[in-house]
Image (cartoon, helix red, strand yellow):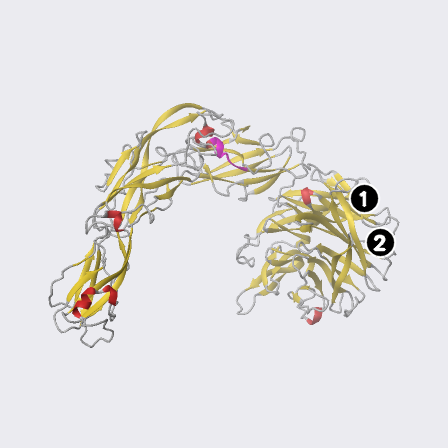
Amino acid sequence: MRADLLPRIAFLARCHGLLIVLALISTGCKTDKGSDDPTVLGVPPGEAYLGVEYYYNFGAYGGERLLDFSLTNAPSWLALEDTSNKARPGIIVRGVPGLSGGNRGDADLGKVENINLITTDGERAGVQPFDIEVKRNPLSLDADTIAEGQSAETPEAGETRCEAPELDETGSHSYHINLYDDEGAVTATEPRTTDTNPVLVRVLLEQPSVTRVAVAFELSSDFDPDSCDEGFDPEHQRCEEGDANRDDAIIGKDIVALGSDSEDALPVPDYLDYQQDENGVYSKGVVTLEPGITECYIRLEVVDDTVPEPSESLQIALTEVRNGLAALGPSDSGVRTTLVVDDNEPRVRLETVSGRQRDALTVGTKRQFEAILSGEREGSIRARLGESEDSVAKAGDYYIQVLNDAGEWEDNDIIEFPAETDRVRFRVRIPDADEYANIGMDDRFLLLGVDQTYQAGREGFAGGEEDGELRININELSSPLVLNETDDFVPTDIALGHEGRLYVTGYNDAANDQVLVRIFDQKGELLQEVAVSDGATVLNEPQPVIHYTRRQVTQGSTRVDRFEFVVAYAAEADMPGQPAHGGLDVVTSLYWFDSAAAEGSEYSPVWTLRTGTSADDIPRWVGINDDSGFVAVAGETSGRWTGESRVGGVDSFLQRIDTDTDGDDRVPKLAWTRQIGSGQDDSVVAGSAVNASPYLFGASSGAVAGQSSAGSTDVFFYNASAANSNITVYQRGTDGGEALTDGLYGLSNIWLAGNSDRRYSIDESGDDDNVLLGGPVAGSNGFVLGYSVSGHVNYAFSYADPSRTGKDHLLTLQAFDNDLVVAGATTGAFAEDAVDSGIQQPVIARISPGETVTSEEDNPDAWDLWRIQPKIDGARIEALANYRDDEIVTLLRESVGGSIEWKIVLFSAEGERLN
């Protein structure tokens, strides 16, 4: 080994270590050297390796004659190249640990300290002490992930590298496969001869050896043909392809060191010697690194079979050094690395016909879906479909259907992709209600994908693409749920809660407008009716609003889920324990799910709080914060809240109510109420309690809190955090009128829905901020605008169409599966296939905000996933709720004869009506 020469003036050696110096110097240790004293220059490397040449060229100067050099306390393997006097400025030390000085091998391992190189001119002497630690020369392995059908790239040539083996051709290997019946029992074996692709594992030697190094290698796997899934015995598919073996490669079938028929196409390089195991498979051998080589190669072959498999692993190990001085790793305890073999069979992804992966079906119905094949293949290929492990729906809850040769749908869970065909339709059928049974509260859902358990080890099948499953919710509410079929209940708002509970709040028009919450399960059965207001108190269309949350709380020393809903409504008359403040007051009631209630698991009251001014205060939205549990109320007031200023007309207010403890009871505490107005009659449509500072969303024809009014009606929003915190109002609009109807905070934006006579787009050409633009169009058209919390407009989705006169009225907005759903009514043709009849019909649409679309001009169709206009005359959708991102729940108001019917109507994620 050679190191650079480093200048350094050597000190005189210690007196007790240099007898030769004592013979040359009259007395003592000379510490004050004259300018002519001999001096050794350089610091040799402190590490040496067994079997590797150690080499260092010392420099020297000084003395009055030719210099002599000698070593003391040196290991036996180290010596001076030449000790005779000659005219040269230094000396070379050289040696090979383990070989020179007596072939001592491992006995040369270890550290030798205080080796001294001494130089003298015959009268004076100089010395350089140094240490050397001898280590093993370790071998290691390096390999990349490998894949069927792909050969390794030829590595670059180099002086210290072996010549790369042949990699440009394919090899060949013969083996046997199992044949299985439909139940997985082995019926026979068949021979196969399959192409193989050469891949490389690098064998690395840390330092170049002076002798040849030969090391044995061997492939191994955790695959065990006798390890079967519970309830199965060999010979069976659930053994070789069972849970214990699924991710393990089979040596001789998936990979070999040398294919049985490969030598002609893939000649074996001289440095490789392949050997057969007890099964006659070339799975081991010896690789030899010639002197000076530090990188060599073990060529393996991956069998390019036609069986769909997951990524499989095996190990390659260096097992024994057959020749030379090298170590199996730094501690000579062994070298092993894991190889991962990726499958190259084509893969299947399941989607709706619109290209998405979530839908819903009602019991007794069926729908077509699509299987998409990707990857290279030859001829036709098949895939068997079935539920995944995480699917709640199991066999018998659904049936797969394919078209037969007669063009008829028949039950068959194996789909086939003919040659050159990459898309195939199939159908999912849900049994009728009398055949389908679900005792659970929640709907079952089907996670449909490729049945890997059946296909494992079977040729001619496609694998399942990662994240390629289709989720189908199975809806059991096959008819609309009529909410006022037996009484004069008037629903006003809905929410979805735990285990699929649907909360419908409203009032009984025939019983003093008593506020109620009716709780239904997913089958439409009434689970509980909660009387929110006292039946004896006379109310006047109190318009209650509701919100549900599930949050984690500490109970004792355990974190548990708490299910809560809150209702807020307007009341004028005195109520038991809640006297009036004057005009309409805000009454807020919190409930929680009490599993230990005497009547059984149900919602029980926590507290009720009445707040208000001397004038009218009307709540328009209520929410619960998921973290701390505070309640927020947003509404309108014509009075003045304590500590706040009244601007005039109808102002907005935002209120926070905390829950305190009083012994074992939880009681309400009004934290603060903030009031903001414009001097005109402002309207409030919604709010958000997602953050610690709740939000309010509204509209105004004036200048809110001193903001600038852009048109006849603008949108505005703000948030508040405390009784005395600064409030920044963001008022936005165009020269038209943005009549706001709903809003929410989610998907990283504030979303506002409403109606206008404008077609919106965004001008992004400015240096500072985007500008919302609105070109006039005829009629009333729906919009959804997306703003950052700092008032920056990011999205402008407009349903205005220059080719028609808009007659739309959007009323409600809901987040759904990272998208938005908006709904309302129209008297025109909102959907593509609808008729402009002049009769009111409900509308519902799904919007995808996407990542880059900010206006219709960017891509007019990118955001508009679908629009639906159910043919229900005299109806509109008043409210929306989201069931698990599986179903869109709508509160529908329909004129039937001379009366009004309120119904729950469901839609799938693809906009299909479910009941």
Q: Quadrant of residue 314?
A: top left
Residue 827 can be seen in this image: no
Magenta span includes 450: yes
Which of the pair 136/685 is nearer the observer?
136
5, above or below 836, in the image: below
Q: Is residue 668 left or right of residue 370?
A: right
Which of the pair 136/827 is nearer the observer?
136
Q: Which residues are magenta?
A: 448-454
Q: Amino acid at mark 1?
A: Gly
700, above or below 368, in the image: below
- Mark 1 lies on a secondary structure that is loop
Q: Where's residue 160, x and y in %?
A: 24, 52
Residue marked by disc 1: 898
Report the number of discs: 2
Q: Where's residue 767, x and y in %?
A: 53, 69
Mark seen at residue 540 = 2
Q: Where's residue 809, x and y in %?
A: 69, 54
Mark 1 and mark 2 lie on one chain; the one further toward the N terminus is 2
